[in-house]
Each structure stands twice: as structure tokens, then as C-alpha cells.
Image (cartoon, helix red, strand yellow):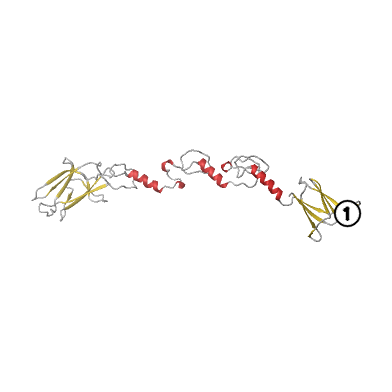
Amino acid sequence: MRYHFWQFLINQEGQPINDADISVYAAGTTTPVVVYLGELSSETANVAPQVKTNSNGFFEFWIGDEEEAIGYTRGTKFKISWNRTGIASGTIDNIEVFQTTEGVDETDADSTFKNKLISNALAYQFDTHSKHDVLDDGYPIHGLMMVDTNSTENVFNKVISNKLANEWEIHKNYEFDSFSPSVLDNSAHNLQPINYNSTDSKFNKLMADNILYDLKASIDLLGAYTETIEVTGWVLNGGSGNYEYNIIHNLDWDFPAIDCWDIDSRMVYAPTNIYSEDANIIKIENQTPQRLKVGISRR
């Protein structure tokens, strides 16, 4: 980097001194230093006097630091002398050309000079940090890496570990398809399927098995028909003069609800008599061998 030094050379009356020789030396010596004649120019001067004042008494030059092709260690001090025929010459020693503080260059990844509030290198890291996106798998900030939801690795070098992200992914995608007595080892929050044939009271389901068991029993009591039978094979009972038919069911219920429909007329029909023989047999008597559809359900 180059550091700019400029000044106006004037006399005691404040008048500019033009065409004066300006010599630049290392501080405390008569050893000329190399100065650049432009901020970006490669033109240099290494023999005193290196520059002259213009008509306004103005002069300027640049000195490079150690990052330049020709430069000096930061902190180096310099001596400036001036001279012109007919006027008194003069010297100022121990001049600070290198600034003690500078602006930060966040594009500079290498400089570590402590001549800023923070060094370029640190500013560069801040700048790349703010632009970093972990999803692009760039240079990891603080060693953070992308989360892999297919991994169960438990290393804490991510915002969350792979293991936790994996569990969240499974949780998000998990779905109970149906009631099942099967035990699921990796269900969300260890929730298990409901088994309505169980009286287990553990609270690891949306509701405990015993609650569903009682609920199912209540539903069965109030539910739809569980047996529907077509009656067409009547038997004549000569003693009573009626036709009769025994309906065998599996409800294990002595007094089920009975609905009878006449198949031909599609009307509700009332047989002559209906008897409950036992918990699984209903006897129907009728004066004629009517074609009936009989529905039986638990009350």
C-alpha cells in the first residue's frame, strides 16, 4: 500500500515558494529513500531531491509499505529537507508518513497489521462470515457444517446435530395408517398404535388401550347390525299351525334388536311371534312362509 504525503512550502509572509528542491531521507540520516510519483504510477525517484514545488509551493509524493514492490516497514520515519537559491533551506526530521490508523480493507485476506480498529484479515473474515451460506457447503463458520437428515451422527458441529435432524425428519414423515397391535420402535415421541383388544393403561398412545376398549364396547352396544339373514326356508309346525324359522347368530346376547323387512313388498313386516331361545338363537313364527330379510344387532 502507498501512503500519500503533501504540503505547501511558504515563506514567513505566507507566499508560496515555487521551484524548491524537496529531498526525502530516512529519519536521522542523509540516505535518500525511494518515493512514488503517483498513487498508481510505477514511476519512482530514489535520488535527492526527489520532487520540486509547483507555482503554488505545493509538493507531494507517495511512500510504499512492505506490501509494495519498493517500500519500507510500517512505522519507519522520514526526514524532509528543502532548498532554493536565494532563500534559507530547512529540514524537518522524524516525520510520520505512514498513518497510525487506516481504513479497513475487507477484501484483504492476508494483512495483519495493527494499524486499524481491526486488521484487514479480521475484517475479511467478518465479511465472508456475513455472506456465508451453510447450505452451499462453503467455508464453515465456526466449524459449523450442514445438517444431514439421513444421518444419525451426534457430533455437535452444526446448528443442530444430524441425529436430532434425523429424528425430526422421521417425526415429520411418520403416519399411523390404521389401528394395529404391532409395537413401533421408532415412532414419533414413542407413540404406539392403539389396540382396542387390550386393557393396557400406559400413556404412550393418543389414548390408552383400556379407554378405547371401553369405548368400543359402548359402540358395539349402540352400533349398526352385525347380522343380516334372509329367511326363505320356513318349516310348518303342525301343532301350532304356524310356520317357524330358527335364526342362529353369534351376538352372545339374549335380547337383541330385530328388524324384519318383506323382501317382495320392501315394507317393514311384523311376524306373528318372535322368541329368544337363548343368547344365539332367535325363533320367528308366522302364519305364512313370507320371504323376509331380518337384521339382528345388540342393543
Q: Which of these two is toward me, 274 or 290? A: 274
Secondary element at image label 1: strand
Please provide percent x and percent y for residue 4. 23, 49
Q: Which of these two is toward me, 114 or 256? A: 256
Please provide percent x and percent y for residue 83. 12, 48
Q: Is residue 281 left or right of residue 176?
A: right
- Few, some or many residues within 10 Å of mark 1 (<14, 14–19, 20+): some
Quickly name the residue at label 1: 242
Residue lying at the far right of the rendered structure: 238
Is residue 199 depicted above or below 240 in this figure?
above
Please provide percent x and percent y for residue 8. 16, 52
At 54% from the left and 42% from the top, the residue drawn is 167
Total labels drawn: 1
At 13% from the left and 45% from the top, the residue drawn is 91
Q: Is residue 165 left or right of residue 58?
A: right
Q: Which of these two is toward me, 78 or 179? A: 179
Residue lying at the far bottom of the rendered structure: 265
Q: Residue type at mark 1: give it.
A: Asn
Q: Is residue 281 left or right of residue 9?
A: right
Residue lying at the far left of the rendered structure: 86
Is residue 79 depicted above or below 295 in this figure?
above
Please provide percent x and percent y for residue 144. 44, 42
Q: Which of these two is toward me, 6 or 62? A: 6
At 15% from the left and 45% from the top, the residue drawn is 92
